[in-house]
Image (tube, rainbow, N blue to C red):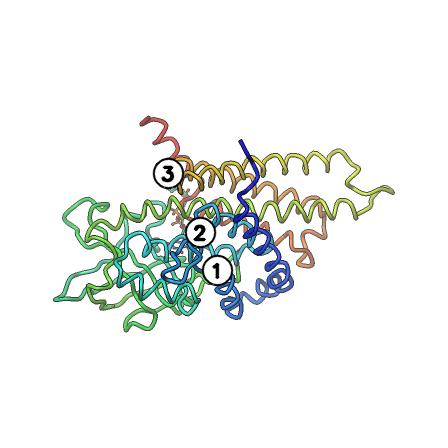
Amino acid sequence: MNFELPEQHRILRDTVREFCEREVKPHARQWDAEERFPSELVPKLAELGLLGIRIPEQYGGAEMDTLAYAIAVEECARVDGSLSLTIASHNGLGTSHILSFGNEEQKQRYLTKAVTGEWLAAWALTEPGSGSDSAGMQTTAVKDGDDWVINGSKMFITQGSVGGFCVVLARTNRDVPAQRGITAFIVEQGTPGFDSSKKLEKYGCRSSDTVELTFENVRVPDSQRLGEIDRGFYDTMSILDRGRVSIAAMALGLGRGALKMAVDYAKEREQFGRPIANFQAIQWMLADARVGLDAAELLVRRAAIMADSGEPYSQEASIAKLYASEVATRVCNDSLQIHGGYGYTREFDVERHLRDVKICEIGEGTSQVQRMVIAKHLLRD
Ligand SMILES: Cc1cc2nc3c(=O)[nH]c(=O)nc-3n(C[C@H](O)[C@H](O)[C@H](O)COP(=O)(O)OP(=O)(O)OC[C@H]3O[C@@H](n4cnc5c(N)ncnc54)[C@H](O)[C@@H]3O)c2cc1C
């Protein structure tokens, strides 16, 4: 097996890495401290093609594959978890749902604006009362003439306030089991009754935008229904498969970034008259980190390549996300340990990586949910 990336992907990796070192790394700590979404970065992300990685050229996108998307997310995460979460959710959830299930008119209207950054995409599945049990949602959409009227609320929505539009999942049929009665809609920012003002304060990824959304008699025309009526939950599950590959890639990038910091620090910091890198206890933490991250990388690449091949890859996406997020959380924790007391201060970026990486064990299905998915496949096969 050839482990070298194809040339196009190597160029992408190097370009995104160079961009992040120059434009993101010097500011990420401050954006995090201010809990501020860096809107000024959006045009630059668009210019680099990072807002339409998988979107076809006919809509202005870069028309690359899932492997490219995973590499871009990983590279952003090396320096800033918040940015990688933005890139992952914009590409993997909101725009991906329209790309996979939208009609031509919807692709023209939304994807062309998404690639330029004029409209960032949000995607709203989770509710205050339903997370892991996502089909247990209470938000409803009721047909009224040619319109649908949406009522309810959504929780923890990335790009909820800075996004130009939001793909919203709602119950459309209460007479059938929940999975068979959910439909997706596109709601534009500024639609009467749509409130996205309630921003949430977070432990990590603090410069990504996370919002509680409310919908009070929000009226959208049927032309903003996305996909078939009552099929939205099944579409959502396939969107989450690809999304999970990117959360795994985000974890991998955060782990790689933290390990680099730990290696640099261990060579510099002296105790007992020698660099701490000379101590075997430190070397073992570094070696274990490298092994775990390399294994995670192979799992992420396998899932991404399978996604592009058209084979079923739901189980592989869950395996990649579960393993990468748990390994990366351990790596970030050990990297902070190697920094000692300094690592615990905000003067070093390693504490931000540790805070940021935790979301990878929660978002797009917790580690417990990934184990449920993997076990379900195992027992079924
Ligand atoms: C920063 C951030 C960004 C997010 N972005 C988005 C977004 O853009 N769009 C969106 O729709 N959602 C988003 N989410 C929501 C995220 O996907 C959910 O938080 C996640 O799916 C878990 O749901 P929950 O928080 O309701 O936890 P719960 O489902 O309440 O789970 C609580 C605990 O119980 C465990 N648990 C639940 N059920 C079981 C079970 N059957 N067996 C064993 N253990 C179980 C869980 O693993 C967890 O440990 C985001 C969340 C965060 C924090």
Q: Which mark is residue 347?
A: none
On whether ligand 1 comes within 8 Å of the CB at mark 1, the answer is: no
Closer to the camera in the image, 149 or 291: 291
Which numbered disc flags the more N-terminal residue, 3 or 1?
A: 1
Q: Which marked residue is nearer to the observer: mark 3 or mark 1? A: 1
Secondary element at tag 1: loop
The image shows residue 106 at horizontal and vertical percentages of 28, 62
Q: Amino acid at mark 2?
A: Met
Which residue position holds label 2?
A: 64
Seen at 60% across and 54% down, the residue is: 17
Q: Secondary structure at mark 3?
A: helix
Q: Residues within 10 Å of mark 2 (few under 14, many from 20)?
A: some
Looking at mark 3, is its residue's CB closer than 8 Å to ligand 1? Answer: no
C-alpha separation, residue under disc 3 versus residue under disc 1: 27 Å
- Residue 271: image x %, image y %? 82, 44
Q: Quadrant of the C terminus?
A: top left
Q: Earlier in the sequence, mark 1 or mark 2?
A: 1
Asked if 22 appears above or below 176 in the picture, the reply is below
Could you tell whether 358 is left or right of 337 in the image?
A: left
**In the image, is 284 to the left or to the right of 360?**
right
Q: Identify the disc placed on residue 49.
A: 1
Say which residue label 3 marks.
Answer: 314
> What residue do we see at 42% from left, 39% from top?
317
Asked where in the image residue 366 lies, by quadrant, the reply is top left
- Asked whether disc 1 touches disc 2, contact meaning CB atoms under 8 Å apart, the reply is yes
Residue 346 at x, y = what percent? 66, 58
Question: Which residue is located at x 57 percent, y 65 percent?
Answer: 31
